[in-house]
Image: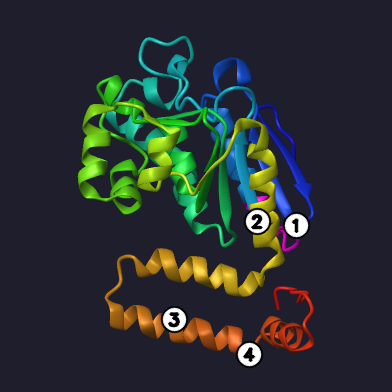
Amino acid sequence: MNSENILFKKEYHVAVITLNRPDNLNALLEPLVLELSKIIDEVDKDDDIRAVVVTGAGKAFSAGGDLNEFVGGDRETFHTKGSAEGSRQGSRMIASVIPLRFYKLMKPTIAMVNGPAVAGGLVLACACDLRVGSENARFINGFIKIGLTPGLGLTWIMPRLIGLPRALEFLYLGRPVYAEEAERIGLLNKLVPANELEKTTMELAHGLADGPPLAIRLTKMQTYKGIDMPLDIAMEFGAASETLTLLSEDHREGLAGFREKRKPMFRGR
């Protein structure tokens, strides 16, 4: 599933998606976003894939939108089609992939943040369920720096990750959040030295892949949808999900592994 701008590999039950424009800090030009959408569709359909890692080649995770596609740039795209409506439709196209396609992907996702994650790149990192970063990671609301409101759902995402007061400061000022602060406020789940980043991320991904796929997928759905549900409705939703897992082969295998003091072999059924 490699494409012009993205590298793809499958290791064990883990898909690794690498944005591959290192000379442009993995900026999110329109063809890359379309390629990413197709890859996520294929990942979603592949039952052998149980976890997904997203990262960037070179020194950056992603610098966000390619400024050559904005007003005054040398490539006409959705940002420069001459009308507000054309720009709105283009932004909706990107948002249907980043972040919406990641939230709807019923498999756990990890952003391996190897460098700056800016604007749309920030949204991509935050659209993943978990984030592991090195000391080179930093998170920047680049939208405000070029006179734009935060796009791609960032004003919805950030308060849910770091709380409202911190989110507003981050969104208003556009100042970088460096790795140590990112870990402290919850933007990073783990902070490790750069030379251990890939190893730590893949260990986490393999741990997820070893888990019961059905239970993890239902947990992801329950958690994201439950954020905006009243508690009583969330509990009804949870009861239905638990019933599905109680009747699953994975539950029986999990019990057998516990009783026999061995590692269970989950199959997602």
Answer whether labels 1 and 2 touch (C-beta < 8 Å): yes
Answer whether labels 1 and 4 touch (C-beta < 8 Å): no
What's the amino acid at mark 1? His
Answer whether labels 2 and 4 touch (C-beta < 8 Å): no
Q: For the residues marked 3 and 1, what is the alpha-carbon distance in whole angstroms? A: 27 Å
Label 4: few (<14), some or many (≥20) within 10 Å? few
Residue 166 left/right relative to 245 = left
Q: Which disc number belongs to residue 247? A: 4
- Which residue matches tag 2? 51
Q: For the residues marked 1 and 2, what is the alpha-carbon distance in whole angstroms? A: 7 Å
Q: Which residues are magenta?
A: 41-50
- Note whether 255 is above or below 204 in the view shown: below
What's the amino acid at mark 2? Ala
- Which residue matches tag 3? 238
Residue 11 left/right relative to 72 = right
- Residue 241: horizontal and vertical position, in percent? 51, 81
Residue 146 left/right relative to 6 = left
- Which residue matches tag 1? 13
